[in-house]
Image (cartoon, grey):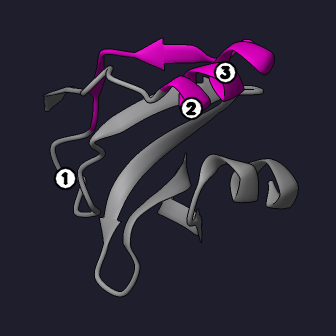
Amino acid sequence: MKIKLNTDYSEKESEFLKKHNCEILSEIKLPNHFDDDIPIRMFIYYGSYIGEIEDDEDGLVWSALGKKGWGECYADLESLEEGF
């Protein structure tokens, strides 16, 4: 399934993306059997696909997409930078 992604980022988020030479994705193709949360926004961060997803407990969070679904969640891009 092909997903259209939001490409709007705040000024602070844009600075982070530029600082790390991230590629912003406008769409992504996910397998039809993908059961995890559908990302709202995504970018490539040092070779990893990072998506903004809705977490039941924490609201919107950032997480890396892996073969088994989403990984550890980060509240913001600064947390991602520190913990990734």
Query: SS class of the residue under badge 1?
Result: loop
Quadrant position of residue 39: top left
Question: Label 1, label 2: how many angstroms apart (C-alpha)?
Answer: 31 Å
Q: Is residue 25 magenta?
A: yes
Q: Residues within 10 Å of mark 1 (few under 14, many from 20)?
A: few
Depth check: 58 or 15 in front? 15
Image: magenta residue range: 11-30
Q: Secondary structure at mark 3?
A: helix
Q: Position of residue 44 (x, y in %)?
A: 60, 25
x then y, percent, for residue 67: 53, 51
Disc 1 designates what residue? Answer: 33
Lower position in the chain sequence, tag 3 or tag 1: 3
Rendering coords of residue 75 (x, y %): 56, 65
Residue under label 2 = 13
* Amino acid type, mark 1: His
- In the displayed structure, does residue 16 sit left or right of residue 44? right
Foreground disc of the pair 3, 1: 3
Earlier sequence position, callout 1 versus callout 2:
2
Read off the residue under disc 3: 15
Left or right: 7, with 43 as reference point:
left
The answer to whether residue 3 is left or right of residue 75 is left
